[in-house]
Image: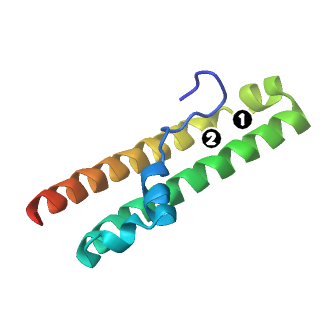
Amino acid sequence: MVYGGIFNPATISGVAWQAARESGVLSNMKYSTILLLAPTYEAQERYRALSDAVNQSLVNDVRRDGMDRVMRDRFAPFIDLATDFKNREGTLLERYRTTLKELDASR
């Protein structure tokens, strides 16, 4: 997690879902498939939004207090933060697996 920055959560992308929505492809998709995919993309977006908020908060702390102070005096919460995001990433991966299995079963 601490590589190239203070906090680096998993990189995720909603490009496929966004492109499908904006191009009108969803109108050609079965409604049951959309209902299957939408919650997964919503969970992914919540993860990304939380990641962005945590990153912005850390950047603000560093700007205000300095890198040394943040990393030296406040290192303990980073352990909890890393653990929390590891768990969130695991939950997201399991959601992906479940969604893919359900898509395969719905063919």
Q: CA distance from mark 2 to mark 1?
A: 6 Å
The circle on residue 74 is 1
The reply, left or right, for residue 29 in relation to residue 61 is left
Q: Is residue 97 above or below residue 64?
A: below
> Of the residues shown, which amino acid type is indicated by label 1?
Arg
Within 10 Å of disc 1 (Cα), the crowding (few <14, some 14-19, many 20+) is few
Q: How is the image coloured?
A: rainbow
**Disc 2, disc 1: CB below 8 Å?**
yes
Q: Is residue 22 above or below residue 50?
A: below
> Of the residues shown, which amino acid type is indicated by label 2?
Pro
Q: Residue furthest right?
A: 64
**Looking at the picture, how far across and down is residue 81, in whole percent?**
56, 43
Q: Nearer the viewer, residue 70 or 54?
A: 54
- Is the C terminus in the top left, top right, bottom left or bottom right quadrant? bottom left
- Residue at 81% x, 40% y: name it: 61
Picture quadrant where residue 80 is located: top right
Which element type, helix, strand or loop, lies under badge 2?
helix
Q: Nearer the viewer, residue 20 or 96?
A: 20
- Residue at the spot of label 2: 77
**Looking at the picture, how far across and down is residue 40, in whole percent?**
37, 61
Q: Nearer the viewer, residue 37 or 93?
A: 37
Q: Is residue 22 above or below residue 13?
A: below
The reply, left or right, for residue 34 in relation to residue 11 is left
The reply, left or right, for residue 102 in relation to residue 49 is left
**Looking at the picture, how far across and down is residue 82, in whole percent?**
51, 38
- Residue at 74% x, 40% y: name it: 58
Picture quadrant where residue 3 is located: top right
- Residue at 77% x, 32% y: name it: 70
